[in-house]
Image: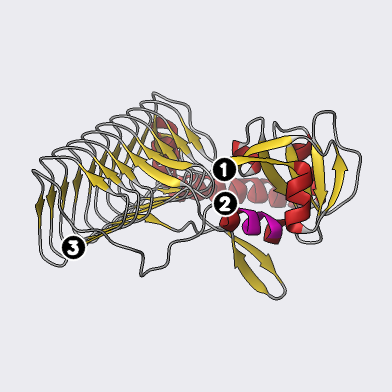
Amino acid sequence: MRIPKPFTAKELAALLGCQLIGDPHITATGINEIHRVKPGDISFADHPKYYKKALESEASIIIIDQAMEPPAGKALLVSQQPFHDFNRLLEYFQPTPPPTFATQTPNFPGVEIGHNVVIGEGTHIEPGCLIGHNVVIGPNVYIGHDTIIHPNVYIGPNVYIGAHVVIQPGCVIGGDAFYYKRSPAGSTRLLSKGRVIIGDYVEIGANTTIDRGVTSDTYIGDHTKIDNLVQIGHDTYIGRNCQIAAQVGIAGACRIEDDVILWGQVGVPSGIHIGPKATVLAKSGVLTALEGGKVYFGFIAKEVKKAWREIASMGQLPKLLRSLSATNGHERADDDSSLSR
């Protein structure tokens, strides 16, 4: 996420009330989670297991809960609550619009708009679009030409939707990320300030939800088709020409390359990479990265031929057990006879 204007480490330390270690003149131009940082970004680390990753990352300024010597070219902001202070900066740089956000008159030439439609300020809709009844579109949204949005859809702030897109009824595009820090006092949400970007000729089925990025973007590539009741988590990248069937769940920060097919009820946990032209069959659980160009199946998804061989072998177990039992019986008989002699 880019910030509206550059801030020095000294200015950020004063804003947060943190101790500054390192060059006070290092300038921040963005703020991001550690797995998405670029030079000039602010990030945070609040546990020893993340210190090394944060210090060796491209982040220029790190909010951290332990005083230490920073690497060259970095500044540390020492905080008792890095997660909390990171949230403070996110809200400072991009205040959350309230549910009663400011609206504008729905006057877009060449756009057909249904009844009871709410459109936030700064939103632009290109000609040829059809917006169904009871649609809510947040502020600063862009919708490309000839897109169809069916009734009862919610589109959150800053979402970008390409041309010739179809969004079926009941979808939520740009809801907040499911991202919490647990503590004895309860769970605290990391604020969502990223976007959803949807390419051209994408279709999204009824009651599907696509969460916005936390500090970056959730991305859906051109010509991808998504079925009903699909959940796509924050900061996930889905490439071109993918097909995702009903009740698939994809967690945050995944990368799914072009031409991937996920059949019904496939589960993908956070941070997983699936290579191009991979197919995952129904009800599979993807627990590790999958190489492209192969078909996978199983609770721990694996190549489909191997999975089917393992399933087929299960049917041979009764015969195998009877054979082992008979063999053991003959061996015992032989042992008994030798004893009698």
Which residue does the image show at 35% across and 47% down from the upper left?
Answer: 159
For mark 2, what is the residue?
A: 93
Q: Residue furthest bottom?
A: 185
For mark 1, does the 10 Å Cα neighbourhood hold few (<14), some (14 to 19), or many (20 or more) residues?
some
Mark positioned earlier in the residue sequence (1 or 3): 1
- The region drawn magenta spans 85-89
Under mark 2, the amino acid is Phe
Query: Is disc 1 placed on a helix, strand or loop?
Result: strand
| CA separation in Å, label 2 and label 1 | 6 Å
Under mark 3, the amino acid is Val
Q: Residue furthest top?
A: 293
Q: Is residue 192 visible?
A: yes
For mark 3, what is the residue?
A: 117
| CA separation in Å, label 3 and label 2 | 29 Å
Left or right, 285 with respect to 71, comes to: left
Query: Is disc 2 placed on a helix, strand or loop?
Result: helix
**Label pair 2/1, CB-CB below 8 angstroms:** yes
